Amino acid sequence: MIDLRSDTLTIPSVEMMQFAFRATVGDAGRTNDFGRSCDPSVNQLEDTACELTGKEAAAYMPSGTMGNHVALLTHCKPGETVLLDPLQHNYRIEKVAYDSKFGQLRPTFYKLESNGLPNIESISLMLKKEKPRLLCIENTHNGAGGTVLPAECLKEIRALAEEYCVPIHMDGARIFNASVASGVPVNKICSHVDSVMFCVSKGLGAPMGSLLCGSKEFVERALETRKLLGGNLRQAGYMAAAAEFALRNNLSQLAEDHRRARRLYSLLKSIPVLDLPVEPQTNIIIINVAKTGLSAEEFVNELKMCGVWMSTSGDYVRALLYRGISDTAVEETFNVVSKFIQKRIK
Ligand SMILES: *Cc1c(COP(=O)(O)O)cnc(C)c1O
């Protein structure tokens, strides 16, 4: 089976786990005399995250979802308004912050352009009208097809946020993909936002976790929120060490993933009945299968029986490239899909 459902399917390498096995660990849920965790490997990872993002402080989180939840619930109080776009993971998939029984935040939306970039006038209008407590952006934008927010766009959003004194949280689950694709260092991208969450468990290939980074004062409060949500892990250093290994060794993998995504895109684009609306900038391909007469779900289920497993994202079919998918697998995917189309679609 060629499994293209997600880059979370990355399996840690033997070298990574050997590095992790040797980690010095402690109780990461407790604080030492210096206000840091009692797990040196977690502290090391958090320091690395600060260096990479240029932020003062960082907190290791069990998942990206929790990283975003903690960010929202630290920036905002119940009843306050969050401005984001409706395709963001942090709204589409993560509902707890907005649930009336839980976070009780009020989502309000700005428009996305058809190219997946935020509509700046819409952000400006909504900042004025809704007076949100927090503005959220996603980079790369998963639902829009892994699109990268250009520096110019980030600058414009920053200027607006400052005009209205609203902090920005960036869901940077794939911020390293954005950096590799654009050639802009991660700290430069993050300089436009107040807090950022990034995942180590996706293309970077670590088994679990994400980092929430921001000012010292913000991260101190975020650690309180993390504890309340049950996110204090104990000997987390084993996993943090694997993440440290990923950040040191696996960044170059992302460029390979992007190259393979472009290759798969150009192969699939040659199939007339498939509509690929966005040329991939990173590792995500989205496919509109409407012209095949199948729904996205039917397409995925039937293709799976032929040996290629994709996922759905709204009305689209989605394929992700990651270190488990080789050049050969890319060519094979194309062969399977074209045979499937010939057989199934008359
Ligand atoms: C995967 C993802 C998350 C959540 O990360 P998990 O570790 O799966 O909880 C958040 N935002 C975006 C954009 C993602 O792609």
Image: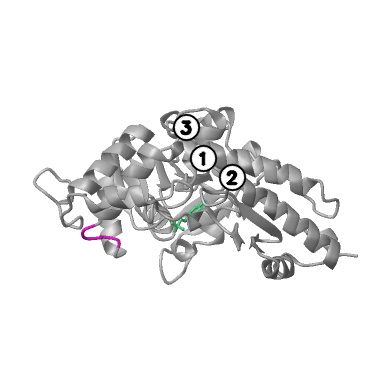
Quadrant placement of the C terminus: bottom right
Name the front one of labels 3 and 1.
Answer: 1
Considering depth in this image, is 45 or 259 the residue closer to the camera?
259
In percent of width and height, residue 183 lies at 52, 27
Quadrant placement of the N terminus: bottom right
The reply to whether residue 179 is visible in this rendering is yes
Name the residue at 37% across, 54% down.
Answer: 209
Q: Ligand 1: does it lie within 8 Å of the C-beta at label 3?
A: no
Distance in Å between CA atoms under marks 2 and 3: 19 Å
In this image, 235 relative to 334: left or right? left
What is the three-letter code of the residue carrying label 1? Leu
Residue indicated by mark 2: 283
Q: Badge 2, how many Cα within 10 Å: few under 14, some, many 20+?
A: many
| Residue that protrudes farthest toward the left in the picture | 33
User: Which of the 4 image quarters holds residue 236?
Assistant: bottom left
Considering depth in this image, is 258 or 152 the residue closer to the camera?
258
Q: Which residues are magenta?
A: 231-235
Distance in Å between CA atoms under marks 3 and 1: 17 Å
Residue indicated by mark 1: 254
Which secondary structure type mostly characterizes the magenta part of the structure?
A: loop
Distance in Å between CA atoms under marks 1 and 2: 8 Å
> What colour-coding does the image apply?
one colour
